[in-house]
Amino acid sequence: NAGVTQTPKFQVLKTGQSMTLQCAQDMNHNSMYWYRQDPGMGLRLIYYSASEGTTDKGEVPNGYNVSRLNKREFSLRLESAAPSQTSVYFCASSERGQAVTQYFGPGTRLLVL
Amino acid sequence: GDSVTQMEGPVTLSEEAFLTINCTYTATGYPSLFWYVQYPGEGLQLLLKATKADDKGSNKGFEATYRKETTSFHLEKGSVQVSDSAVYFCALSVNTGGFKTIFGAGTRLFVKA
């Protein structure tokens, strides 16, 4: 099992460009998440999908959109990148429930110039 | 609102020293508590968890006890190794009409040989 995979690993964008971050999991999990990690701020939830066909905003959704393509895949799109979106982005998945473990991908490092 | 507060790092210790990383939380309802670890260049992975008061989570020599009276979940290890150098995140999960996980800011640990 590959677990949670993310592409690309690293990306440089210019302000105003768009891009899509891809995430896939092979653990048959219902729930998937997108986080951003910034120094001193821990992980902040951007969007999540509790189950296939549903998506909801997290703490910091502005400037992002998501698509839950199927049970395996959950993509994050930046329509018009801004320097404030420079960050490391993590995708995670889990079963539904309060005490469940989240499984994280290796991250995408994004630099917006 | 729900939140997690961790001691600021970095924490620098010599090999075989005793480790404590403090974590306190604020939550409505009755949360589950987690410690995740992030090694350099990787995503987060679960270290241990506890789901009810007085539960002790343990793994790889690390321990944490769910203390409801002090709303704390401090991480301890009796003898750290160089390989324990990483960033440690305390997190809670609550059911607020959907399951939400909140992460602390993370504490970086350096262990010197």
Image: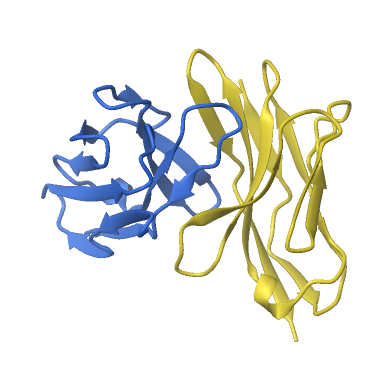
Closer to the camera, A1 or B95?
A1
Q: How many marks?
A: 0
**Residue A33, horizontal then vertical, whole percent:** 38, 38
**Residue A29, horizontal then vertical, whole percent:** 39, 37
Closer to the camera, A97 or B94?
A97
A52 lies left or right of B112: left
Residue A5: image quadrant is bottom left
User: Can residue B21 be seen in this snapshot?
Assistant: no
The quadrant of the picture occupied by the C terminus of chain A is bottom left
- The residue that appears at 27% across and 48% down in the rendered structure is A23
Above-or-below relation of A57 to A83 = above
**Residue B84, horizontal then vertical, whole percent:** 68, 70
Chain for colour blue: A
**Residue A49, horizontal then vertical, whole percent:** 34, 29
Chain for colour yellow: B
User: Can residue A108 be seen in this snapshot?
Assistant: yes
The quadrant of the picture occupied by the N terminus of chain A is bottom left
A27 lies left or right of B27: left
